Image (spheres, grey):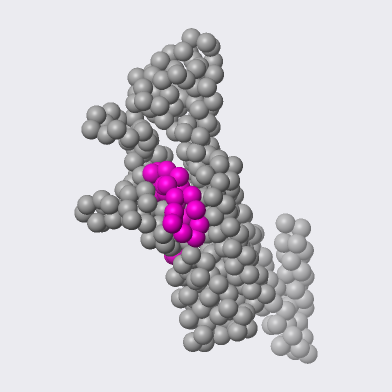
Amino acid sequence: MLLSSVRTTIFCGCRSASKGFQYSNRSPQLRQWLVKRSQSTITAEAGASSTPAAAAVPNAATNRILGRWLLGCSGLVVGAVVLGGVTRLTESGLSMVDWHLVREMKPPQSQAEWEAEFSKYQQFPEFKIMNHDMTLPEFKFIFYMEWGHRMWGRLVGLAYILPTVYFWKKGYFTRSMKGKVLGLCGFVFFQGLLGWYMVKSGLEEKPESHDVPRVSQYRLSAHLGSALLLYCASLWTGLTLLLPTHKLAETQRLMQLRRFAKGTGGLVFLTALSGAFVAGLDAGLVYNSFPKMGERWIPDDLLAFSPALKNIFENPTTVQFDHRILAISSLTAITGLYMFSRRMMLPRRAKIAISLLTAMAYGQVALGISTLLLYVPTPLAATHQSGSVALLSLAIWVLAELRKMPK
C-alpha cells in the first residue's frame, strides 16, 4: 500500500508537471513519456495487489517430501514382510481365528478373555493335530506374534492413506501421481483382505489330508507377492522423485544394459516369490545338503506327483530344486550385469548401485546355503528372507539410476 501511495503521488506530480509543460513547448516528448510511464506503473501495481500469488506446487520441494514419504512407507512394508516371515517360521499365523478390522486391535486383557480366545483356537485343526498339549502361556506367545503382524499391517495402511489425504488437499500431487497413490492405497487394502484369505486356508478342516495344518502355499505366495509388488512400486516411485535422472547418451550398449538390468530384476523377484512356496511347504527341510540334493544332483522324487505340472507347486523336492536353480540363475545374471557394466562409462551412483547389488547377491546365496545346511533355524531363515528384500531393493535402485530422461 505504501508503494502504491508513492506511485500515486508521483503520478499527481507528473500531471502537474504536464500542465506546466502545456505552457511550454520546450520538451513535449518528455512530457508524454512521464505521463505514460506513471499510468502504466499504477496499473501494474494495482493488478499485482489484487491478484494473489499462485501456489508453486507441485515442485522440487514437494517432490522431495513425497519421495521421502514413499520411501518411509516402503520401509514399513519391509517390516511387515520380515515380521510375516518370522510369524510363519514360529508357526504363529493360525493363532487368531477371527478377523475384525477394529475390534481385534486390543488383545485380551483379563484371564477370562485369554481363556476364551484359547478355547476358540482349540476348535481348529492346528491345535487338534499339532498343539493339543499347548499351554496358555505358549498360546500367548504365538497369539502376540500374529497380533503384532496384523497391527503392523494396519500401521502400513495408515501410513499410506492419511498422508495421501493430506497431500491431496495441499495440492502436492500431479495428475499422474494421483493415480499412482490411489493405486498404492487400494493395493494396501487388497493386501489385508488377501492376508485373511490366506489364514482361512489353514483353519479349514481337511479330512482327506493327513498332513500338518498349514496355509495354502498358493495363497501364501500371492500374499507375499502382493506385498513385494507394493514395496517395489513404492520404492520405485520414491526413488524417481528423489534421484535426479542422469543425462546419459542413448547408445546401443546403454540400451542393452537397461534390458539386462530389467531382466535381472525380474529374475530376483521371481526367486524371492519362489521362496514363499518353499516356506509354505516346509521344503527347506527336505534335502539339507549342498550342492547336491542328498547323493544326487537331480533327486529321484523330482517328478513324483502326477500330472507333472503339479510338482512345480506342490512337491517339496521340486519346489526346493526350483528355488536353488532360480537363486543360482539370479547370481549368474547379477555377476554378468556387473561385468558388462564395468566396460561402460556410467555415473558414480550407478556404479555403486551395481557393485552393492553384486555383493548382496553373493551374501544372499551364502545365507541361503547356511540356512539349508543348519536345518532352517528361525533367526537365520528370517535373515535370509530379509536378504531377498534387500537384494530386490538394490535391483530397483539400479533400474532407477539407469532410467531414461523424461521427455
Residue reaching furthest to the front: 295
Nearer the observer, 297 or 13: 297
Residue 169: tell me if it is visible. Answer: no
Instruction: Indicate the position of residue 214 as horizontal and vertical percent values.
Output: 37, 36
Which image quarter: residue 180? bottom left
Q: Residue at x 70, y 82 (%)?
A: 33
Which image quarter: residue 175? bottom left
Q: Is residue 288 left or right of residue 342?
A: left
Nearer the observer, 274 or 49: 274
Residue 297: tell me if it is visible. Answer: yes
Residue 148 lies within the magenta run = no
Nearer the observer, 112 or 21: 112
Question: Quick check: 128 above or below 71?
Answer: above
Instruction: Indicate the position of residue 137 as horizontal and vertical percent values.
Output: 54, 19
Question: Quick check: 369 above or below 157?
Answer: below
Residue 290 lies within the magenta run = yes
Instruction: Indicate the position of residue 76 as horizontal and vertical percent values.
Output: 56, 45
Question: What span is colored magenta in the figure?
Answer: 266-295
Residue reaching furthest to the bottom: 26
Q: Residue at x 71, y 88 (%)?
A: 29
* Main secondary structure type of the part rendered in magenta: helix
Q: Is residue 22 left or right of residue 271?
A: right
Q: Residue at x 77, y 76 (%)?
A: 17
